[in-house]
Image (cartoon, helix red, strand yellow):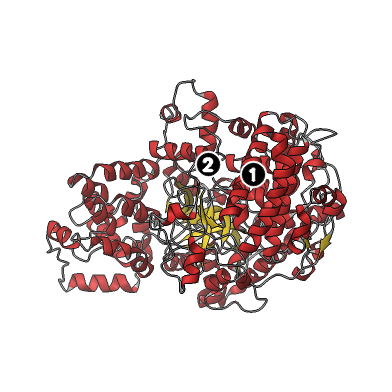
Amino acid sequence: MFLEDILRSTGYANKEMVKYKEKKQQGNKFSLGWNLKAIFVLYLDEKITFLLVLLDFFFFYFSVDYRHSETGATALMISSGRGFLSQVEQLISMGASIYCKSSNGWMAVDWARHFGQTEVVHLLESYSASFGFGNMDESSLVQKSASDLSAEDRELLTAYHHSFDDEKVDLDLIMHLLHSICHSSDAGAILIFLPGYDEIVSLRDRIVFDDKRFTDNAHRYQVFMLHSSMQTLYQKKVLESPPFGIRKIILSTNIAETSITVSDVVFVIDSGKVKEKSFDALSRVTMVKMGWISKASAIQRKGRAGRCQPGVCFRLFSRLRFQNMLEFQSPELLRMPLQEICLYTKILAPINCPIVDFLMKAPDPPPAVTVRNAVHMLKTIDAMDPWEDLTELGYHLTELPVEPHLGKMVLYAVVLKCLDPVLTIACALAYQDPFVLPTLASQKRAAVLCRKRFAAGTFSDHMALLRAFQAWQKARSDGWERAFCEKNFLSQATMETIAGMRTQVLGQLRASGFVRARGGADIRDVNTNSENWAVIKGALVAGMYPNLVHVDRDSLVLTESKEKKVRFHPTSVLGQSQYKKIAPANGQAAAIQALPTDWLIYDEMTRAHKTANIRCCSVVTPVTVALFCGPARLPSNALQASSSFRGRGVSNDSSDSEMEDKTSADLALLKLDEWLHLKLDPEAAGMLLQLRQKWHSLFLRRMRAPSKLWSEVDETTVRAITAVLSAEEQFAGLQQPSGIGQRPRPVTCEELPLASTWMSTNSRNSSTETELSDFSHAEKVSVKSTPALHQPKKYKEKDILLSRQSSDDRSAQSSVKPADSTSYSNACATPSSPVLGKVEFSNISPCSSKVIEFLADIILQLGILLIN
């Protein structure tokens, strides 16, 4: 049964449908009296730029597809017709539909084509190729195919679509249909397909708590929820037959299409919607969009009804919608990032064939702009040179079974000698979040507290992943891993897969020569700094770049190179209040204000609605950013003296005193890329730049000859970087957790998931694990002592470094209390508020600059002379 059949047979009518029918009976007609060209001229005068600046404010209260009441024109149509390319990109990234039509039937691409905006036409056509034309809104679809409908069906569909937003799921209609099924039939399980977790929980709450038609007879129903991010325990329960007289109601995503078959399902209610990830190559944002399923999925869902007996499928979409659905789901090649594909393409394609030309030969080729942006990203992370040839790093990335940026993170960890913790984090990011969603709304706070307990006050989601895996390894060795996962909202299957992935990646590192069986560069040597969280974050920063966010302390917002305002994802521990009790009303602002530094890295930026969210974040120091962000080879003008950039008008006009102006004017400018600019003391800047150059020279040598023994100069460089990062972390008040470098025990073949594609190739040395209770208290964590902060003068002597850098001394720790966020100097020294796409500056504190000076001086004494 389709939507029109359901409306006709059940007599469903909401309040808006009744109002619409009353107006039709009274003869009120909707007039479209304005001339489109006049409206176009009215909206596109000199004030259009100002209006587009207010887009974020306007669309916070209204839909991004808000239409003019008479012409049906949207902001995307207006921007397309005028040729505002950046605004078109911004509106699309905010979720604007390219398929909406104005009253004359024009879509945004038609507006651009009519007014001769060629670049906008190409952009919109690229998006059309990515997402297909199966997303035309329902009103336009009914209007277009009116001749194919009966008068009654056309009237029903028109009234229904006028009363309800087709971008949502009509839970009221589902409840009405559910009651109708339960009232007319006594037996048979009901399977309801919903797009996501929010819709599943909302419908469950209506059935269990809100609707008296069900709450008064709660003993007659069993409600189950199925989601890929929920505990597998509930998937097993849903397969069991209920007692006599009890009806089973299953609320599920598309996981029930093929992954799970419930034999006693008789009725299927198909919302026709699915949530899919699609990657926007222009803004590097992963958008989670709710859209229509394909015909193949609709047929598959219908087949779930009556697997062992006759059944009925109720489709909450019209026959017209079904006929206009895509035959199959869009290929992942059109929806996902292409960096990894482009990397392998370079090896497989003919020598002189550009990557974009080779991929255009695919059965469903991705848009050329997406391929070019992926290639540009590979150049950004130094996997390719300007001529699209693989670098030494790029060749090694093709050998690792993870995404390029995660592979770079692992290789940096090898050279920084902190492999095991980074390996665990990289494998967790490569597969999926091991934390699962709670089944009850009352458990949400408990799930958040679990993440925070694992993070242990380090302002890091990566730490939560690492601690959770280590605690799971400990629980598995004690034989209670399943109970541990249930208690801490973790997925047992995901943990097992991550363990298998660790083994495979480590095996590849051994095969490439980065990890030797014995001697130098053995498994113990590459984990020398695994207990140092500051060094581990250095590897994370190198892999996550350019996924970097800056904190605007004045406005208390997070800014990114392409997004002027982002928020923490709800699952991030950084977005939660640092207080133990009730979070304040302005939770995001309070969370941002509590951050101890002004820079953060993130794994993924997603957009479900209007505001972009960043997930899996960690705070990092400006020195870490300066050392590991940007290209390996900076241009000759990357470091500019204070006079050179002051002469071009870069000054601190917002300073409150002449002393502040003078202080700002004396700072040097370090340009790492087009957006990432740092201000710091000129002398410290030169030292920091030399330290950065020595590091990248060392990394390049290791990529060219992974099996070559380390020289004393190489060891000195890593020790100096370790000391610099540790000192900066301590100055920022960031805590140094203990036990993070303890290696998990080997995984046997019997323990690996059989269905996983990640097969075990090597075993790992066993060692003791850290109890969950050991890191559940933030007060107990400690930080490595850095004598330089207390006695800088002594480090002028050459014989101090080697005596201080022994492995015994590296394990010494001293407890410190976390500093208040206000004690760390504001990193933003911009003359005015940051603007999207403009330069942002960050100051490196004077105290940490002194640390850089004496440590870089050590490198000059012990390293540079040997190299030269």
Whole-number angstrom distance, CA of label 1 to CA of label 2: 20 Å
Q: Which amino acid lies under the numbered mark 2 shown in the image of this protein?
A: Leu
- Between 731 and 503, the one lying in front of the other is 731
Residue 773 against residue 546 in the figure, above or below: below
Residue 532, picture quadrant: bottom right
Kindly indicate whether the residue at mark 2 contacts the one at mark 1 (C-beta within 8 angstroms): no
Q: Which mark is on residue 857? A: none
Q: Is residue 811 left or right of residue 258?
A: right
Q: In the drawing, does residue 789 fall left or right of residue 178?
A: right
Of badges 1 and 2, the one in the foreground is 2
- In the image, which disc is placed on residue 409? 1
* Residue 291 x/y as whole percent: 42, 52
- Viewer-proximal residue among 299 and 709: 709
Return the x and y of residue 88 as percentages of the image width and height: 32, 52
N-terminal of the two: label 1 or label 2? 1
Quarter in which the N terminus is drawn: bottom left
Q: Within 10 Å of the Cα at label 2, are there few (<14), some (14-19), or many (20+) other Cα atoms?
A: some
Residue nearer the viewer, 827 or 262: 827
Residue at 32% from the left image edge and 63% from the top image edge:
53
Can residue 696 be seen? yes
Depth check: 479 or 295 in front? Answer: 479
Residue at the (66%, 50%) spot, across then down: 538
Q: Which residue is mark 2?
A: 634
Q: Is residue 336 left or right of residue 70?
A: right
| SS at mark 1 in the image | helix
Mark 1 residue crowding within 10 angstroms, few (<14) / some (14–19) / many (20+): many
**Quadrant of the drawing holding the C terminus:** top right
Residue 335, given in percent of the width and then of the height, sits at 46, 43
